[in-house]
Amino acid sequence: LAGNNVSFTEDFERRKDQDVFRFRLDEGETVRIETDTEGNRPDTQIFLFDENGNLLAEDDDSGQGLESEITFTNNEGYSGRFFVVVTPYNRDPDDPQTDFATGPQFSGRGDQGDLNVPYTLSIEKEIDIV
């Protein structure tokens, strides 16, 4: 993803769907990741992984209604790629260590009511203005 503030509108095409987004974050930078939905549908979950596939943060419903939100400061000791995975409610990672070369493995059936309903994912990096 390019830029400090980006948004994408997606939907879940099947109950076991998951959408993966990649971005760069330097050491010490903070990012805010959130979903925005119409009428609390779809019910989203978001998961943040580092470039090695380690689960760093997850959220279900910390935003408004059933929306998801994570604020994360990169204190991992390196600058690099990070991944956000958005899933419908009840789709969780099989393992907190995920291999993005072969694709993340998630289990759970997802919610039938969340199919083909759009959501917007926003990723906003906080930048210092001097």
Image (cartoon, rainbow, N blue to C red):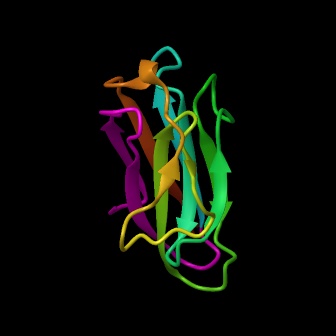
- The quarter of the displayed image where residue 130 is located: bottom right
- Would residue 129 be seen by someone viewing this image from the given angle? no
Residue 60 to residue 54: above or below = above
Look at the image and give the residue range highlighted in magenta. Answer: 1-29
In the picture, measured across the screen, residue 73 lies left or right of residue 23, that is right
Q: Position of residue 3 (x, y in %)?
A: 36, 61
Q: Which residue is at 52% across, 68% downward? A: 98
56 up-or-down from 14: above or below: below
Q: Is residue 5 magenta?
A: yes
Residue at far top of view: 39
- Residue 19: image x %, image y %? 38, 48
Residue 18 in the image: above or below residue 67 = below
- The residue lying at 43 percent from left, 42 percent from top is 121
Q: Position of residue 26 (x, y in %)?
A: 54, 77
Quarter holding residue 93:
bottom right
The structure residue drawn at horizontal position 64% and vertical position 33%, both measured from the top left corner, is 63
| Foreground pick, 12 / 63 | 12
Residue 83 in sight from this viewpoint: yes
